[in-house]
Amino acid sequence: MATATASVHANQAPPRLRLVQPQLDLESLSASWQVALDAAGRAIAASTPLLKAQEVAQRRERLRIERLTVAAELRGFARATRARRPDVSAS
């Protein structure tokens, strides 16, 4: 019976699969990044009593650079998708 079924399906074209990608909402994407970056800033602030001043300063600088990088990436995404530019604060 398996042979009969296989021969029937052999003459049919395989089903067309369609890739479904969820729409990326720039507003929610930038808001999620803002929440994550703000949380990182709060974590650095909370660690201040436990770390040397130089370590805290380095972490703050890395976070500042990460904020700039994320903002640039989101602006590029907005250009590519012709969406309104996101608002990610630098602080």
Image: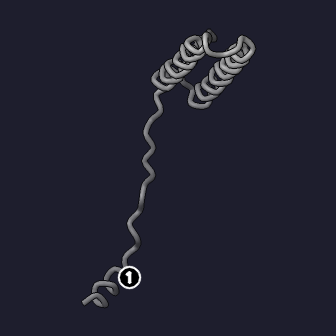
The quadrant of the rendering that contains the N terminus is bottom left
Q: Residue at x 64, y 19 (%)?
A: 67
Judge by depth and name the residue closer to the eye, 56 or 19: 56
Q: Residues within 10 Å of mark 1 (few under 14, many from 20)?
A: few
| Residue beneath disc 1 | 10
Q: Quadrant of residue 79?
A: top right
| Residue 86 x %, y % | 55, 18
Indicate the quadrant containing the C terminus: top left, top right, bottom left or bottom right: top right
Front-most of residues 84 and 22: 22
Residue at screen point 38% across, 81% down: 11
Above-or-below relation of 44 to 16:
above
* Front in this rendered view, residue 27 or 47: 47
Per the image, label 1 sits on a secondary structure element best described as helix
Q: Amino acid at mark 1?
A: Ala
Residue 83 drawn at (x, y percent): 54, 24
Tell me if 12 is positioned left or right of 83 in this view: left
Q: Quadrant of residue 47?
A: top right
Name the outermost residue toward the front.
50
Q: Residue at x 55, y 12 (%)?
A: 46
